[in-house]
Amino acid sequence: MLKMIGRLKTHYLRLHGQGKTITLLFATVLMAMGLQLTLHAGTNQFLFDMDAIKDPGSLAVKLEDTRAPVSQWIASQLSEDIQWLLVGYDGISDPSSKLQEALLSELNRLLQAESLYEAQVFADIELSEETQVLIAQNPKDGEALIRLNRWLLADAYPYELASLSGQQDSEDSKGIETCRENLRLIKLARDNYRAANADTDPQWLSELSPEYLDSKALLCPADATAGVPGVLTEGASDPTLPCSYLYEMRPSKKADQEILRMQEGDMTPIVRCEHYRLNLSAAGKIYRNGPERAIYNSNKTEFSALSDFLGDLRSQHGENFLKTQTVRKEIKTATETLVLKHVTKMLNRMEVSVLEQVKPQLEAQFGKGILDTQMGMDILQQVTGQVRDQVKEKLQSQLQSKLGEEFLKTAEGQDILQQLSVLMSP
């Protein structure tokens, strides 16, 4: 616009006496400027402001943890500068003003760029009626496009971003912050405990108190029962101290969680607040639950599902249910579907994790580009093989624990073990 005005002024100097024409041109330009300002003012109400980013920390964690398709899709469209800021964020402290400002700027840029909607990306998201109406209109620009993108982001991140309606935006911000602080303290206490106990997790959160943690940090401000046992799921209540938080590394769940962590990585939650839907991950990051994928809401592993299946069989057929071939075939099919089907995915994630950990160490010792050499590839293959053997041992142990030695001695059980060996082969 400024260049256009400059050209008109130059043209005016050349034309001299044609004042009326120039006046008309300037009037046209000013009208266009006024129209643009009006449109801009009209769409401003649909853009994000700082208050609309309700939980910047959780949003930053989810955009950096791109396991969920929607987060991967959104993150891929962010600028390189903010992606570096996301990588540098520890996931537990208050985000810096620089990161928050960058988030605000990038979100508003995305609102105005093009439609964020992709059917496959948002397949797991429960879309509001308003969003569905706008999707059907398929807007390409203007106010409708901004509104559509704003609704899409609010549907995908309901605890992080305020919706345009504001209907579900009334939350206890003070209580949430107190709960966050409790989880921060639990994270620090767990770190100190593990440092003093050969990287071993406590069996219960109460073991952190009083040496590493004040017991008050185990109580969520939203817990009206003050941590009374029995409020959480069966077998999950801390046996020693009142505790509001669900600890996923408790004895009955530890083996399953170690398997889940192999699949999902260090973002697997180890402490949960069921009141404010806050998770503390194994990596020490805090984020809210949400509709993005079951990974944010559930810690149910394939082995947990298999246990439920076996429990149903026991209730139907009694303790001698393994004696019939029909039931053994059902167990074999369920094991293949619930567990073996996911082994390849687990191995792929494990190999990516090994590469992420080993690469910096190798480059620090041998220089960049070491992985492009035969020596680097041999070292990586050796480390991956060792980790693969450990994973296989854990999987076999879990199968033995869930299915029992009696079943594994049957033809069906031996076939499962054979399939596992094939899947685990390099």
Image (cartoon, rainbow, N blue to C red):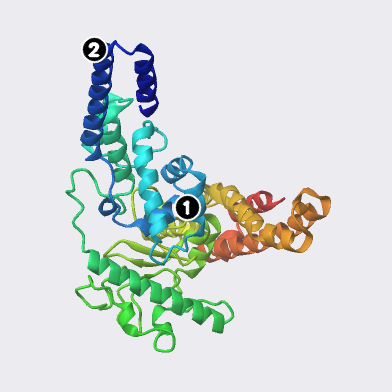
Q: Which residue is mark 2?
A: 20
Nearest the eye: 413 or 113: 113
Amino acid at dot 1:
Glu
- Residue 313 drawn at (x, y percent): 41, 56
Which label was assigned to residue 218?
none
Left or right: 341 as drawn, with respect to 426: left
- 310 to 164, vertically: above or below: below
- Residue 174 drawn at (x, y percent): 23, 68
Nearest the eye: 26 or 416: 26
Element type at marker 1? helix
- Residue 60 drawn at (x, y percent): 41, 54
Kindly give the residue lying farthest to the right in the view shown. 374
- 174 to 328, vertically: above or below: below
Q: Which class describes the residues within 10 Å of circle 2: few (<14), some (14-19), or many (20+)?
A: few
Give the position of the N terminus as an image quadrant.
Answer: top left
- Residue 340 drawn at (x, y percent): 56, 50
**Nearer the N terminus, badge 1 or badge 2?**
2
Question: Residue visible at 52% across and 48% down?
Answer: 329
Amino acid at dot 2:
Lys
The answer to whether the residues at label 1 and label 2 have Cβ atoms under 8 Å apart is no
Kindly give the residue lying farthest to the bottom in the view shown. 211
Question: Residue visible at 55% across and 80% down?
Answer: 195
Nearest the eye: 216 or 227: 216
Q: Rounded to the nearest whole Å, what is the CA distance between mark 1 and mark 2?
A: 58 Å
Question: Residue visible at 57% across and 77% down?
Answer: 199
